[in-house]
Image (cartoon, coloured by chain):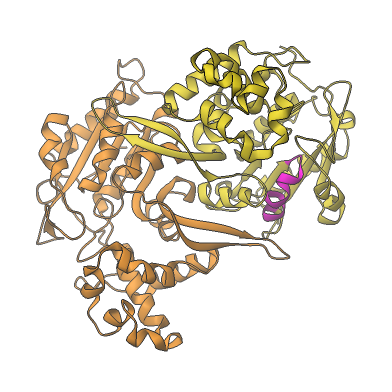
Chain colours: A orange, B yellow
C-alpha cells in the first residue's frame, strides 16, 4: 500500500517512504528482519492535538466538576477550588506536585475496568473547548495513515506517551488500531484484590513518568529491544529519538513541528504543553526529519 | 497442526485440545476473537525445571564465584562467604533480604546489553549440578509443543515469571520462540544514560515482584487485558490462574504437578522452589486441569 494523500509530496513523505522501502526490500543492504521492525510514537502532539492543555488534563478537570457534588469540601480546598471557580490555570501554576490531589481524585481508587469505562464515557460526550470536536476526532489523519502504512510493511506500532497508560488503553485500540499491550505510558501502582470477583485497583503511587529519560526506560521495560523508527514532537521526546537513532543499522526519527495555526495550532519553544526547542535545534545534525505540519500535511483531522 | 506425541493421550491433553478447538472454530458459541487469544505461562517449574534451586539463583551463585577475584573482601563478608565456602544453603537460610547483596552484585550496575551477554555466556557454558545438561536443554518438550500448537491456533504466548525479566529475555526468544515484549518478569529499576553512545543501566531498586498477587499486576501492566489461558505449577501462580479464570467467557487454567522423580523431579508442598499446595487442593473446585507429569508426558526434555 502507498502512504496516501493525507501527506503532501515533499521531503518528509519522501524520507519516510524511502526508509520503509530500503528496510523492507529483501536483498537490500538495509533490510530489517520483521521482528526488529518497531516504530514508536509519542501521543500528545504527535498522534493527536495537545492544546490548550494535554487532553488528559482536560479530562481530569471535567472529572473534578463531575465529582464535586460528592465532595462539598472541594469548594474551599485547593487545588479543587480553582477548578470549580473556573480558574484551572491557578491549579496548574503550582506545578506537578500541587496537581497530585487532582490526579489522585480522578485517576486512583477505582478498578482498571471502572476507570476505562469512565474514560470511554467522557470520550463519547466531552468536546474540545475551542474546536468543539470530540477529542478522539482530533487525532491526525496523516499519522493514522502512516501507522497503517507501517503495519502493512511489517512494522509494529507502539505508543510511548507521557500520558497515562490506562487512560490511553481505554480508547486507542479503536482509534489507532494499537492493542493495549503496545501502549507504554506513565503509570502509578496497581493492586490485585482477590476474591469471588477479583479486581485490579489503581493506586496513586507513582511508578513511571514516561517522559524525557523515562521514555527509553519505558521502551526497554516493555519492548525489550530498541526501536528503529521514532516519532515525536517535543523536547520530552528527545531521549526516545536519541535512543532510537543511536542503535546500529538503519534508523529513522522525525519531529512534528506544529506550524499550522489555521488548521491546528502553531507553537514550539515555551509552549505550556509540547514545548519544542532542543530537539528542533539538533534535528539537522542528528539527521532527524522535521515534519512541517502546514507544509507536509494535506489534511490534519479525519473528515468523518 | 496437532498437539503432538510429547503429550500422552489422556485427560490433560484432551482438555487442552478441546478448549483450543471450541475457542477457535468460527461459529462456535465459545469462539474467541484472535486479539483476545492470550495464553500466559509461568516459567520456573512450568516451562523448565527449577530443582534443586531456581536456575537464576544458580546463575547468581556462579557469578559470585566468577567475580570473587575482583572482590577479595567477599571471603570474609556474608552472604558471599557462604557461597565461596561451598555452602550456598546458608546464604539462602536468611531469606530474600539477606540475598539482596548477591542480587545486587550479580544483576545490577551494568547495562542491559552487558547483562544479556553475561547470561548468554553462562547459558552456553554452565551445567546443571545433577543432570549435567545445559540449563536451556532442561526446558519441557511438551510445553514447547504446546506453545507452538497455541501459536498455530492464533494464541499469543506470554511468559509471566517470578524470575528476572532481563534474565529471561536473554535466552527465551531462541528457545521458546517468545519475543522480549512478551516476557513479563520481576524487575528492578532501569536508568537511561545519555551521550554519544547512550545506554540503559540496571539498578538494584526493586519495582515489581512478579509472583503471587504481583502476577495479575504484571499482566495488567504489560498486557492490559485478561488472558484466557494460564499455565503454572506452584502456589505462586495461584493469583494468575484465579485472575485468568474469573473473567467472563471460556477460560482455561492448568497446574503442572511434578510427579516424575525418574525423568525430572517429584515435589509439591514444602518444596524450597515451586511449593504447591493450595492451587492443587483447589484445582478440582475451580476446574483447573492438573497435568500429572509422570502420567501425561511422553517426553520431558527435548532429545536433541
In terms of image quadrants, where is residue B261? top right
Q: Which residues are magenta?
A: B232-244
Asked whether residue B238 is drawn in magenta, I would say yes
The residue that appears at 54% across and 35% down in the rendered structure is B165
Q: Position of residue B78 (x, y in %)?
A: 62, 28
Residue in front for this viewpoint, B49 or A99: A99
Question: Picture coordinates of residue B208 (x, y %)?
Answer: 55, 45
Going 9% across and 47% down the picture, which residue do you hit?
A: A295
- In the image, A78: left or right of A87? right
- Number of marks in the rendered image: 0
Q: Is residue A2 visible?
A: no
- Residue at position x 40%, y 86% in the image: A73
Residue B163 seen in render: yes
Q: Main secondary structure of the magenta part?
A: helix
Between A16 and A65, the one lying in front of the other is A65
Split into 4 quadrants, where in the image is the N terminus of chain B?
top right
A130 on left or right of A80 = left
Of B38 and B120, nearer the camera is: B120
Image: A210 above or below B63: below
Q: Position of residue A281 (x, y in %)?
A: 10, 39
**For the point 26% across and 30% down, which residue is it?**
A245
Residue B157 among magenta residues: no
Query: Image check: A16 left or right of B132?
Result: left
Examine the rendered structure and indicate whether residue A266 appears above or below residue B300.
below
Question: As displayed, is residue B115 above or below residue A297?
Answer: above
Residue farthest to the front, as pictured: B76
The percent position of residue A218, horizontal first and vertical second, equals 40, 43
A30 in relation to B214, above or below:
above
Q: Quadrant of the C terminus of chain B?
A: top right
Amino acid at each position: 500500500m502507498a502512504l496516501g494523500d493525507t501527506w503532501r509530496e515533499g521531503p518528509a513523505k519522501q524520507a519516510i517512504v524511502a526508509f520503509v522501502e530500503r528496510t523492507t526490500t529483501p536483498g537490500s543492504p538495509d533490510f530489517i528482519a520483521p521482528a526488529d521492525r518497531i516504530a514508536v510514537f509519542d501521543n500528545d502532539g504527535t498522534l493527536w492535538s495537545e492544546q490548550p492543555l494535554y487532553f488528559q488534563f482536560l479530562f481530569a478537570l471535567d472529572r473534578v466538576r463531575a465529582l464535586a457534588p460528592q465532595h462539598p469540601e472541594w469548594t474551599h480546598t485547593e487545588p479543587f477550588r480553582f477548578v470549580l471557580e473556573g480558574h484551572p490555570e491557578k491549579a496548574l501554576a503550582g506545578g506537578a506536585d500541587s496537581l497530585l490531589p487532582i490526579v489522585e481524585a480522578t485517576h486512583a481508587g477505582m478498578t482498571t475496568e471502572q476507570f476505562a469505562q469512565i474514560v470511554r464515557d467522557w470520550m463519547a460526550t466531552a468536546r474540545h473547548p475551542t474546536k468543539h470536536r470530540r477529542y478522539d476526532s482530533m487525532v491526525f489523519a496523516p499519522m493514522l495513515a502512516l501507522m497503517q502504512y507501517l503495519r502493512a510493511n511489517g512494522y509494529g506500532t507502539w505508543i510511548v506517551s507521557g500520558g497515562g497508560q490506562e487512560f490511553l488503553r481505554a480508547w486507542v485500540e479503536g482509534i489507532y488500531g494499537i492493542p493495549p499491550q503496545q501502549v507504554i505510558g506513565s503509570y502509578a501502582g496497581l493492586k490485585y484484590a482477590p476474591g469471588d470477583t477479583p479486581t485490579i485497583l489503581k493506586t496513586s503511587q507513582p511508578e513511571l513518568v514516561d517522559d524525557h529519560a523515562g521514555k527509553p526506560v519505558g521502551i526497554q521495560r516493555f519492548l525489550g529491544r530498541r526501536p528503529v523508527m521514532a516519532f515525536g514532537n517535543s523536547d520530552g521526546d528527545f531521549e526516545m529519538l536519541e535512543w532510537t537513532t543511536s542503535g546500529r543499522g538503519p534508523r529513522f526519527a522525525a519531529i512534528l513541528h506544529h506550524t499550522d495555526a489555521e488548521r491546528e495550532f502553531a507553537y514550539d519553544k515555551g509552549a505550556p504543553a509540547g514545548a519544542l526547542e532542543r530537539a528542533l535545534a539538533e534535528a539537522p545534525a542528528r539527521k532527524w526529519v522535521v515534519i512541517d505540519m502546514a507544509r507536509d500535511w494535506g489534511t490534519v483531522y479525519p473528515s468523518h
